[in-house]
């Protein structure tokens, strides 16, 4: 059974199937923050969504991180490693892309329930 949660005009924020939560791309609300600040805000939003639907950051299976400026990767990594315990690190891919103006980082995760 597929369950879809938090419908927007173009997608659902979370789709659930077979005990896995799939989150759409999450971005910071405050575009004035630097790379680390936006990453911290995105991680907090991801954690809130996972908690809302019965999971946690400890259950993240995989993440894809999109950066608008790859020179900010160290700052992003710093926030990422402050957020997750070493034993809870998921598989991860980081990609440099063009994002909406002001958005420095967008993160997509899948997590077990």
Image (cartoon, grey):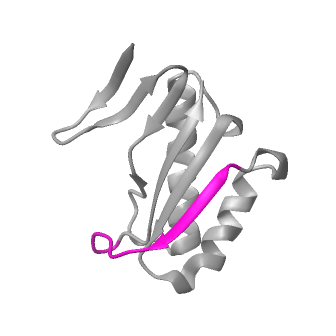
Compare residues 1 and 58 and report the one nearer the observer: 1
Vertical comparison of 76 with 8: above or below: below
Vertical comparison of 109 with 35: above or below: above
Quadrant showing the N terminus: top left
The residue under the point 66% across, 60% down is: 80
Which residue appears farthest toward the right when viewing the image?
87
Return the x and y of residue 84 as percentages of the image width and height. 73, 50
Quadrant showing the C terminus: top right
Is residue 92 on the magenta stretch? yes
Which residue appears farthest toward the bottom when viewing the image?
71
Return the x and y of residue 92 as percentages of the image width and height. 61, 57
Is residue 28 on the magenta stretch? no
Which residue appears farthest toward the top when viewing the image?
1
Count of marks placed on residues: 0
Vertical comparison of 91 with 76: above or below: above
Give residue 12's quadrant in the image: top left
Return the x and y of residue 55 as percentages of the image width and height. 61, 27
Give residue 104's quadrant in the image: bottom left
Magenta segment boundaries in residue numbering: 90-102
Which residue appears farthest toward the left when viewing the image?
9
The residue under the point 28% across, 69% down is: 100
Compare residues 113 and 28 and report the one nearer the observer: 113
The residue under the point 51% across, 25% down is: 52
Compare residues 102 and 94 and report the one nearer the observer: 94
Return the x and y of residue 78 as percentages of the image width and height. 70, 69
């Amino acid at each position: 059974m597929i369950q879809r949660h938090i419908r927007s005009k173009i997608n659902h924020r979370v789709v659930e199937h077979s005990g896995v939560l799939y989150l759409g791309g999450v971005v910071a609300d405050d575009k004035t923050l630097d790379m680390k600040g936006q990453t911290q805000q995105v991680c907090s939003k991801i954690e809130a969504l996972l908690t809302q639907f019965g999971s946690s950051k400890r259950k993240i299976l995989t993440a894809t991180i999109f950066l608008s400026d790859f020179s900010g990767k160290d700052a992003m990594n710093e926030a990422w490693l402050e957020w997750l315990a070493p034993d809870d690190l998921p598989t991860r891919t980081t990609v440099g892309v063009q994002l909406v103006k002001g958005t420095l980082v967008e993160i997509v995760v899948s997590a077990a329930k």
